[in-house]
Image: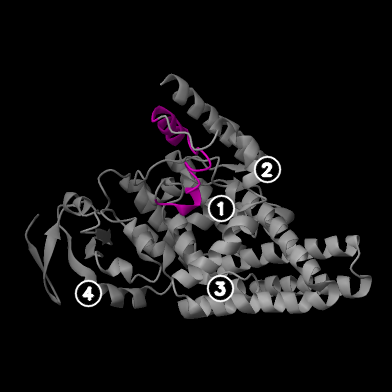
Amino acid sequence: MADKATAAGGELQYFTWEDVQKRNTRDERWLVIHRKVYDITRFCYKHPGGPRVISHYAGQDATDPYTAFHIDKELVQKHMKCLLIGELAPGQPCVEPSKNAAMVEDFRALRSTVEQMGLLKPNKLFFVGVLLHILLLDALAWLNLYFLGSSLIPFLITALLLGTVQAQAGWLQHDFGHLSVFSKSKWNHLVHKFVIGQLKGAPASWWNHLHFQHHAKPNCFRKDPDINMHPLFFALGKKLSVELGIKKKKYMPYNHQHKYFFLIGPPALLPLYFQWYIFYFAVQRKQWWDLAWMITFYVRFFMTYIPLIGISGTISLFMLVRFLESNWFVWVTQMNHIPMHIDYDDNKEWLSGQLQATCNVDQSFFNDWFSGHLNFQIEHHLFPTMPRHNYSKVAPLVRSLCKKYGVEYQSKPLYTAFADIVHSLKESGELWLDAYLHK
């Protein structure tokens, strides 16, 4: 530990990167933002994004995720003042010694260019159009049963329309959750609660808790909750699968996971797991406002359809809609990540860390609509608050930077992206079996 530095609020310590890296335990957590050292040991439990997402950067430089996630940095800085304990010593580099300083600085320059180009500013008419098309499909679903009756074909058409409503509402709530529609966080959060609560019947707090962690450390085992299915249900990633085999652990027949994925993955995630867990989460965390918004969705849904198809018909419709939505959701959200690098956190640069865990799906009008522009997953992960209608504009700049540093930028057809999920599960299952039997 070096000498002391004088600041407006008194004396601050000078620290080295080694000092910071040691503070990554439950008892002591530090991180660095723009060379300033912050003690988040107690604050992490008060962090609006949840304690885990900020704790994932304990002992590390959090400058780039801090910049990526917050749209009102002046407000955030006010809350951070009391956490400031020092800064990096004058002789310490601005970037962690293990990282490529040139890559880090070039990405930060790209971020400045993006801001100057206005690519972080939303076109609110775009999001109004998205909302209106969701409401239109919702109305058509009801009108279909009202005018055509409750026979099988109208019933299935209504289920398909409502499944589309749920999927598209999922992409819209994602926009508000990432603060990419309004310039103030408060308004994004308020509308987010309405969209995910009233249109989908889920708690905003649950989505925030999980999804921000995913963006902070994508595909990092024990940090990204999206890969918590390893090892209980699936063996994910080449290294983790071999590690599991060497330890002789077998919770499932992983060498067949590319087959049973079709049974317990896409069709089952929402109706059999999320459907009950979201209520448990809201009650257990005492998220009463979220719970109230959720209840309005279920009241509206059942009051709308019981007069047309009765109680049993409405329950059947609801479960079918959740089944359709689940398939749509899982295939789209996993096509960008499951086939990619999955391992423990190795504290990579923001650019290379996001690119090794993320790939794109080729642009087309259908792919953009079908995935809510998450076919541009790379750009979304690098700039999570960017409005989705601007992803295509920044993509060439990202490609150019990746080419400069030899970082692989993957983009593939939609069908290939789907197939790669299955292929990667098959490969990791075979790696597990070989290690389990022979190592």
Please report whichever mark, 3 or 2, sits nearer to the chain's N-terminal start: 3
Q: Give the numbered dot on residue 377.
A: 1
Q: Give the numbered dot on residue 413.
A: 2
Can residue 191 be seen in this snapshot? no
Please report whichever mark, 4 or 1, sits nearer to the chain's N-terminal start: 4
Query: Which residue in the protein does label 4 denote?
Result: 82
Residue plotted at (27% across, 72% down):
80
Query: Which residue in the protein does label 3 denote?
Result: 181
Residue plotted at (40% across, 51% down):
223
Q: CA distance from mark 4 to mark 3?
A: 30 Å
Residue 237 magenta: yes
Q: Nearer the viewer, residue 273 or 170?
A: 273
Amino acid beneath label 4: Cys
Return the residue found at the far top: 438
Please report whichever mark, 2 or 1, sits nearer to the chain's N-terminal start: 1
Q: CA distance from mark 4 to mark 1?
A: 35 Å
Is residue 260 shown left or right of residue 111?
Answer: right
User: In terms of secondary structure, where does tag 4 sit?
Assistant: helix
Residue 5 magenta: no
Amino acid beneath label 3: Val
Is residue 18 shown left or right of residue 281?
Answer: left
Amino acid beneath label 1: Gln
Is residue 173 shown left or right of residue 232?
Answer: right
Per the rendered image, the range of residues in magenta is: 223-247
